[in-house]
């Protein structure tokens, strides 16, 4: 029979801050793991160039001091 899954936190709606992925534990159980939000690479400052800057990793501004240069 298929194993039923329940959220591990109180929030029970499929919102942007409540995204999960499935993971198998060493005890052969399937549980939810909560994923972090994906940031975006910075845009060009000139306003004419389309798209994002190449070579800069996607992250949040708050994490920018921590990422590898």
Image (cartoon, rainbow, N blue to C red):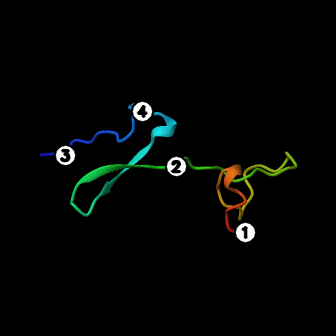
In terms of secondary structure, where does tag 2 sit?
A: loop
Identify the mark nearer the N-term, 4 or 3. 3
Task: Using the rendered view, name the quadrant where residue 65 is placed.
Answer: bottom right
> 65 or 56: nearer the eye?
65
Real-space CA distance between mark 4 and mark 3, rounded to the nearest whole angstrom: 21 Å
Residue of label 3: 3
Do the numbered discs 4 and 1 sit on residues whose CB atoms are within 8 Å?
Answer: no
Residue at the spot x=57%, y=49% of the render?
38
- In this view, 21 is above or below 55: above
In terms of secondary structure, where does tag 1 sit?
A: loop
Residue at the spot x=39%, y=39% of the render?
9
Q: Residue 36 got which mark?
A: 2
Q: Quadrant of the C terminus?
A: bottom right
Residue count near mark 3 (Cα–Cα under 10 Å), binned few <14, some 14–19, many ≥20: few
Q: Give residue 30's position: percent from left, percent from top.
A: 26, 52
Residue at the spot x=88%, y=49% of the render?
46
Real-space CA distance between mark 4 and mark 2, rounded to the nearest whole angstrom: 15 Å
Identify the mark nearer the N-term, 1 or 2. 2
Identify the mark nearer the N-term, 2 or 3. 3
Identify the mark nearer the N-term, 4 or 1. 4
Q: Give residue 11's position: percent from left, percent from top.
A: 42, 32
Residue of label 4: 11
Real-space CA distance between mark 2 and mark 3, rounded to the nearest whole angstrom: 25 Å
Residue at the spot x=66%, y=61% of the render?
57
Identify the mark nearer the N-term, 1 or 3. 3
Q: Residue furthest right?
A: 46
Q: Nearer the viewer, mark 4 or mark 1?
A: 4
Residue of label 1: 69
Residue 4 shown left or right of residue 20 in the figure: left
Residue count near mark 1 (Cα–Cα under 10 Å), binned few <14, some 14–19, many ≥20: few
């Amino acid at each position: 029979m298929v194993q039923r899954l329940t959220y591990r936190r109180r929030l029970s709606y499929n919102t942007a801050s409540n995204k999960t992925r499935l993971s198998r534990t060493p005890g052969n159980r399937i549980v939810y793991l909560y994923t972090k939000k994906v940031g975006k690479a910075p845009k060009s400052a000139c306003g004419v160039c389309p798209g994002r800057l190449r070579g800069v990793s996607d992250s949040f501004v708050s994490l920018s001091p921590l990422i590898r240069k």
